[in-house]
Amino acid sequence: MDQQRTEMLIVDKDVENLDKSEAVKLAAERLRTGEVVAFPTETVYGLGGNAFSDEAIHRIFQAKGRPSDNPLIVHIAEKNQLKDYVTSVPEHAEKLMDAFWPGPLTLVLKHSGTLSERVTASLPTVAVRMPDHPVALAVIRAANLPLAAPSANTSGRPSPTTAKHVYEDLQGKIRTILDGGPTGVGLESTVVDCTGDEVIILRPGGITKEALERVVDKVGIDPALFEGNKAVPKSPGMKYTHYAPAAPLCLIDGDLIFFKKKVEEAEAEGKRVGVLVTEEAAGVIQAHKEIIVGKKSDLAAVARTLYVSLRAFEAGEVDVIFSEVFPETELGSAIMNRLRKAAGGVVLKDENNS
Ligand code: AMP
Ligand code: MG
């Protein structure tokens, strides 16, 4: 792949008439000619490209090093854009859009074959969402295109929640990054399959199961998401290792006494231990490097800082990272889904205290 100079264009997300911003106009122009552009959304930074163009989509996969069988989410700015890409919008999908768009909810629907096959990895379905971020919406409108946009990181690394993270991963590989400040939610969207009678969660995210259940009758979960289940996930991306930090990560499932013991044991083996702990635990757990990931009593704050915290451990700095675990309700389900993937499933459980 040719090396390119990467430009960082600063956009103030709070100004009125973002559509008139020079940076947004330049980004839109480049998207229309088939280039890719990184931009902020409310979840994480996305790497966008024209969803009609095989060439643009190929560029996204190349820049990220993403496996080609992992389909992309198409981002739109108006609900009525949808009818051009999908065969129909079932009633439950309509209800979810009304309740959560713009926002971190992605719907999987049957597509009508108008978008690039590379976006959908040749599946009969397409994943679509409307982001809740003024810069993302302005870029989509200005380009006047549906934009396929996966997270703007190197595949396998923690997702980017600032423009600097995008630069760290994709510098030299893409020309344009729109810097609209740090993202809000910090975890990717919830992906739900709406092609059947029942809404099924394929990837937990910013919109919780509990919130979905307030809008539609029944919400299922793809069995492949449960720990230890060997079923093939219906969301192709869920089968890959993801979000991996610079040293092996291990989840510590036990109280703080157990956590402390595990740190001491690893240190006794001569390991430099990094710990990912909440504010509540930070006073108790000491290690070679401590990163605080929000408050245990405020899971939204943990979600927001999870990826920046995983990125905070530099290569070669620690030999192992131990992380706290979180209750798997509300946002905790998405946080634990990402942590388990980042840890490759490695959990040390306190068997005496479960
Ligand atoms: P990312 O773009 O990195 O946030 O990942 C997008 C997620 O959506 C991945 O887990 C994909 O596998 C999933 N996805 C995209 N399109 C589909 C689809 N048509 N059916 C099921 N999952 C999808
Ligand atoms: Mg991603």
Image (cartoon, rainbow, N blue to C red):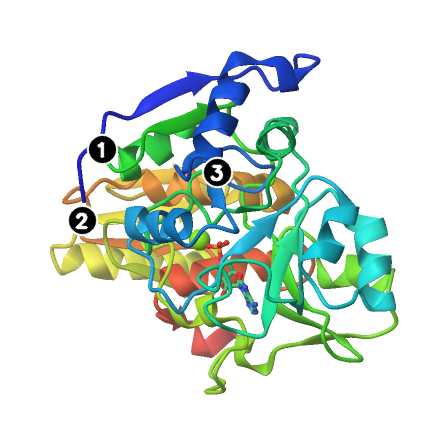
Label 3 residue SS: loop
Q: Residues within 10 Å of mark 2 (few under 14, many from 20)?
A: some
Marked residue nearer the N-terminal end (2 or 3): 3
Q: Residues within 10 Å of mark 3 (few under 14, many from 20)?
A: many
The residue labelled by disc 3 is 45
Label 1 residue SS: loop
Residue extending furthest bottom? 230
The residue labelled by disc 2 is 272
Amino acid type at image mark 2: Arg
Amino acid type at image mark 3: Tyr
Residue 241 placement, left or right of 109: left
Choose top left, top right, bottom left or bottom right for residue 201: bottom right
Residue 172 placement, left or right of 199: left
Q: CA distance from mark 1 to mark 3?
A: 17 Å
User: Where does the image place residue 324, in percent across and percent down from the top left?
Assistant: 45, 55
**Residue ID at (51%, 65%):** 120
Residue extending furthest left? 270
Residue 87 lies, with reference to residue 274, above or below; the image says below
The residue labelled by disc 1 is 172
User: Where does the image place residue 167, in percent across and percent down from the top left?
Assistant: 32, 31
Label 2 residue SS: loop
Q: Residues within 10 Å of mark 1 (few under 14, many from 20)?
A: some
Of discs 2 and 3, which sits in the foreground? 3
Amino acid type at image mark 1: Gly
Q: Which of 93/330 is in front?
A: 93
Of discs 1 and 3, which sits in the foreground? 1
